[in-house]
């Protein structure tokens, strides 16, 4: 799942080997997980772990397994890459939002004036979707061929598909709004903003500290202008997403993502899906590896390589989100089946390698070599990206000048 992206300093691709990690209460001390002793030759990504007290929480071993497997899968699907993770903070989900409202006045202003989709009723949803139907059709046409959308619902045209999409979206939202968990608690806490994709998107736009957020809570997908079919036809919730974070001054300046363990950790049958629920060895280790290898690695594919969600890549592609691949547990097993590297994704990897090489030359002070790599990399980028092309070109031109 994605939104939009941006970028900064990073070196070349090298080896990504064993990663060792221990998570403390980060209020006092940071932790670094690295696959290289030369941090200046790796991409160091900052991580925050913020959790919902109502749901089973991640411990330090869980986080280590998730991060490790995300790196294993990236190497399997895209080749060697050197990444360092630095855990800079962990805490309560409520505290995370409170801190963000205090630290970023514009986010607080957005919260104060924004009325969320889930606070309205079914009749209001119907009116909203019908009013925005032309925009939804345009969004679908810009991103997918009709034959790809037919993986979800066989429609004679985009309008017909959109009608089914809206019908399904409302049905799923209604289910989430009334859902009771096994402990009879409501699915959402009393603070709806904690569980709103739109609120998280806005928070990540203003925050400047984190490249990656790990959480255990549930987020409803409430961006009705961009109804991704693989999100809507599943549960209308989001397990992971990548965002534009223009104030983030890290190795991936302007990029952030979140991954949620809710789907597997909650053990709610409705969200597990039939295939995953029938996996006999649904151990904690398996869940963590599935979340890291299927979910977080996918989000890193958006962040690092700008590969969009696709419905037409070959079997075993990390970025392919066809409906048969959407269960986290089963989807992870599909990725492990030994399929070859996706040649379609390699187009993005090769282009990014050129850009990374250019950034390495910039770091060394050789602008002429950097320019050659960067111009070549920009020309090699595929037409469809998980990021605004103008922003990419603008960023690199600023770096060269």
Image (cartoon, rainbow, N blue to C red):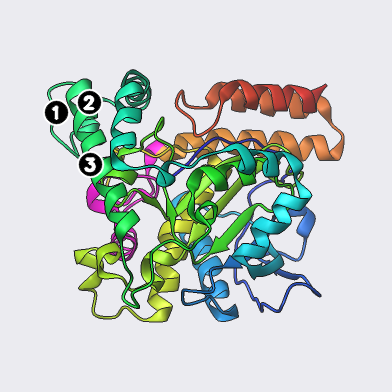
Residue at image position (52%, 37%) is 306
Mark 1 or 2: the one toward you: 1
Residue 310 at x, y percent in the picture? 35, 38
* Residue 400 located left or right of residue 177: right
Task: Assess whether mark 2 and mark 1 are in contact (beta carbons under 8 angstroms).
Answer: yes
The region drawn magenta spans 316-344
Question: Quadrant location of residue 81?
Answer: bottom right
Task: Assess whether mark 1 and mark 3 are in contact (beta carbons under 8 angstroms).
Answer: no
Front residue (pair 209, 377)? 209
- SS category of the residue bearing label 2: helix
Distance (Cα) linking label 1 and label 2: 8 Å
Residue 76 visible within the image = no
Relative vertical location of residue 225 with respect to residue 51 in this rendering, above or below: above
- SS category of the residue bearing label 1: loop
Front residue (pair 139, 67)? 139
* Residue 246 located left or right of residue 262: right
Distance (Cα) linking label 3 and label 1: 14 Å
Mark 3 or 1: the one toward you: 3
Specify which label sits upstream in the sequence, 3 or 2. 2
Relative vertical location of residue 124 with respect to residue 259 in this rendering, above or below: above
Specify which label sits upstream in the sequence, 1 or 2. 2
* Residue at the disc numbered 3: 168
* Residue at the disc numbered 2: 146
* Residue 164 located left or right of residue 265: left
Mark 3 or 2: the one toward you: 3
Relative vertical location of residue 365 with respect to residue 378 in this rendering, above or below: below
* Residue at the disc numbered 1: 155
């Amino acid at each position: 799942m994605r939104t939009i992206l941006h970028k900064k300093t990073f070196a070349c691709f090298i080896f990504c080997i064993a990663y060792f990690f221990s998570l403390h209460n980060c209020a006092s001390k940071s932790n670094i997980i690295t696959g290289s002793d030369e941090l200046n030759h790796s991409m160091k990504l900052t991580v925050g772990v913020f959790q919902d007290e109502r749901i089973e929480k991640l411990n330090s071993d869980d986080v280590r397994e998730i991060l490790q497997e995300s790196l294993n899968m990236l190497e399997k699907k895209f080749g060697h890459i050197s990444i360092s993770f630095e855990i800079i903070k962990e805490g309560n989900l409520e505290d995370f939002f409170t801190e963000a409202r205090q630290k970023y006045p514009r986010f607080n202003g957005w919260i104060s004036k924004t009325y969320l989709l889930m606070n309205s009723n079914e009749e209001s949803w119907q009116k909203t979707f019908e009013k925005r139907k032309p925009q939804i059709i345009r969004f679908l046409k810009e991103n997918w061929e009709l034959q790809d959308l037919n993986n979800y619902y066989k429609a004679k045209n985009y309008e017909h598909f959109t009608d089914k999409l809206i019908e399904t979206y409302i049905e799923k939202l209604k289910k989430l709004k009334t859902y009771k968990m096994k402990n009879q608690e409501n699915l959402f806490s009393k603070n709806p903003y904690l569980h709103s994709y739109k609120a998280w998107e806005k928070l990540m736009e203003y925050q400047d500290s984190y490249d990656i957020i790990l959480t255990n809570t549930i987020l409803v997908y409430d961006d009705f202008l961009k109804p991704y079919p693989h999100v809507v036809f599943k549960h209308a919730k989001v397990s992971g997403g990548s965002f534009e974070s223009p104030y983030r001054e890290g190795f991936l300046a302007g990029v952030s993502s979140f991954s949620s363990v809710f789907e597997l950790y909650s053990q709610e049958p409705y969200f597990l899906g039939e295939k995953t629920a029938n996996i006999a060895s649904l151990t904690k280790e398996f869940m963590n590896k599935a979340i890291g290898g299927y979910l977080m690695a996918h989000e890193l594919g958006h962040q690092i390589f700008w590969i969009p969600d696709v419905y037409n890549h070959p079997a075993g592609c990390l970025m392919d989100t066809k409906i048969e691949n959407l269960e986290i547990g089963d989807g992870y097993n599909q990725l492990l089946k030994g399929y070859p590297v996706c040649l379609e994704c390699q187009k993005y990897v090769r282009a990014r390698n050129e850009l990374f090489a250019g950034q390495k030359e910039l770091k060394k002070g050789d602008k002429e070599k950097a320019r050659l790599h960067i111009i070549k990399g920009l020309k090699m980028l595929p037409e469809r990206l998980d990021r605004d092309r103008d922003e990419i070109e603008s960023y690199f031109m600023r770096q060269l000048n």
